Amino acid sequence: MSLVDLVMPKMGESIMEATILKWNKQVGDTINMDETLLEIATDKVDSEVPSTVGGKVAEILFKENDVVAVGKVIARIETGGAAVSNPSPVAAPVATPSPVASAPAAPVAQFVPSSTPSAAGNNKFYSPLVLNIASSEGVSMSEMENIPGSGNEGRVTKKDILNYVANRKSGIAPAPASAPAAVTSAPAVIVNESQASSNVVASGNVELIEMDRMRKMIADHMVKSKATSPHVTSFTEADVTNIVNWRNKVKTSFEKKYSEKITFTPIFIEAIVNAIKKYPMINCSLDGNTIILKKDINIGMAAALPSGNLIVPVIKNADTKNLFGLTKEVNAMANNARSNKLKPDDTQGGTFTLTNVGTFGSLMGTPIINQPQVAILAVGAIKKRPMVLETAQGDVIAIRHMMYLSLSYDHRVVDGSLGASFLTEVANELEAFDSKREI
């Protein structure tokens, strides 16, 4: 008999740690290869982690709700094979997407931690998330060293730092005498999960509903984005009659030819990509005083889950795909979101986000920026309206398919001229759509 180490899998490029939600097996239980051992959560998705071997669960090294760094041994499986001394990588988990926004707001902001975890002078390990919370809440490194950790080997977890901050604000823990130096330069504002007190007293005919973990995550990211970026929203409208008529004309033949249903979303993404090429500064992020101009154009698209929440899968390198390629990927991402089959990497790397508030019947919205991006575009419901058209014979009134567009942008990077020019260009791209386009 031998023991095989199972480690916390790497869930994506920017993911340095994950929270254990539930152990599906306990010590002594038999487990088959590829059978789910535990469920974990990150800021991006919830995932099921399968066992890489079959055998008996010999040891579980972490408890539920523990935050564990990527690469750490989390369990050991007793097998009949030769001993395995080095940790074996866990097979790619099947991800269950976490809802990331409520319409018409933008999806959850992506937290990008430091490239390597940090350690204090006393050799305590501090994860990037813990350091980020400490920075936003003004917790100095000397204070950090005095916080008792409930994690493995006394490590300070997210829960520990949030409890410390809550106690300090309520006067239980002393606040620092002077403003401390920032623990890390990455800007962050995290909503304290302890703010929702269990001792809330309400009068009248009411029902008290405590936020679940996913709703807390949404609240945290929305508040963080609004606190990080000074939001400005510009509006315009576009005549999308050519698009509506073209889609109505070709949707049957398009599906017959490509086995894919053509929706408006890939057409909108195509217009956005063309506009970004003309105004590339909209496709960037901000790190301190440094603007990071993204050469790749990765478009996030807010997709609705059966629960009514939204998640944002990302169409990578959208500028390299034609309309069929965009349609195929949009449909695949939307279907995977609805069936909880998105992979962790599917929600990462976005450089610009599109959200369709018209899906829910709204004419327009003021979306919240998907951090660390600097802009997000919302498209409203397409409605028939009488419009004045200029013709060679003079002005006429005609019934047209009209749609409002709204662009929220980070005013630290995008000024009104750039924001309005980009938004107008997207509208122009939509209005210039060729109604005789071949499929």
Image: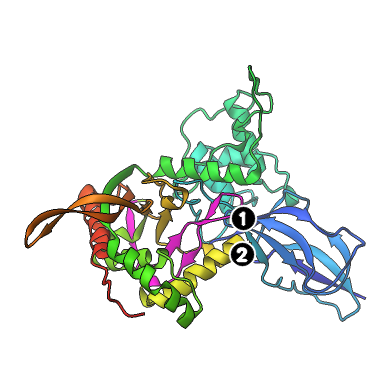
**Which label was assigned to residue 373?**
none
Examine the rendered structure and indicate whether residue 254 appears above or below residue 175: below
How far across and how far down the image is residue 344, in percent? 58, 64
Q: Is residue 402 magenta?
A: no
Q: Which residue is mark 2?
A: 11
How far across and how far down the image is residue 119, in percent? 59, 53
Tell which of 248 and 259 is nearer to you.
248
| Residue 306 picture quarter | bottom right
Q: How is the image coloured?
A: rainbow
Question: Three-letter amino acid code at disc 1?
Answer: Thr
Q: Is residue 211 left or right of residue 267?
A: right
Pointer 2 or 1: first along the chain: 2
How far across and how far down the image is residue 385, in percent? 28, 50
Span colored in magenta: 289-318
Q: Is residue 294 magenta?
A: yes
In percent of the image, x 60 and y 29: which residue is there? 168
Is the residue marked by circle 1 packed among few (<14), some (14-19), or many (20+) residues within 10 Å?
many
In percent of the image, x 67 and y 61: which residue is there? 47
In percent of the image, x 44 and y 74: which residue is there? 252
Q: Is residue 76 left or right of residue 241?
A: right
In percent of the image, x 73 and y 44: which residue is there? 150
Q: Which residue is mark 1?
A: 42
Q: Is residue 418 visible?
A: yes
Q: Is residue 273 left or right of residue 251?
A: left
Residue lying furthest top in this view?
Answer: 203
Tell which of 134 and 396 is nearer to you.
396
Q: Are marks 2 and 1 in contact (CB under 8 Å)?
A: yes
- Distance CA(mark 2)–CA(mark 1): 8 Å
Task: Classify mark 1: helix, strand or loop.
Answer: loop
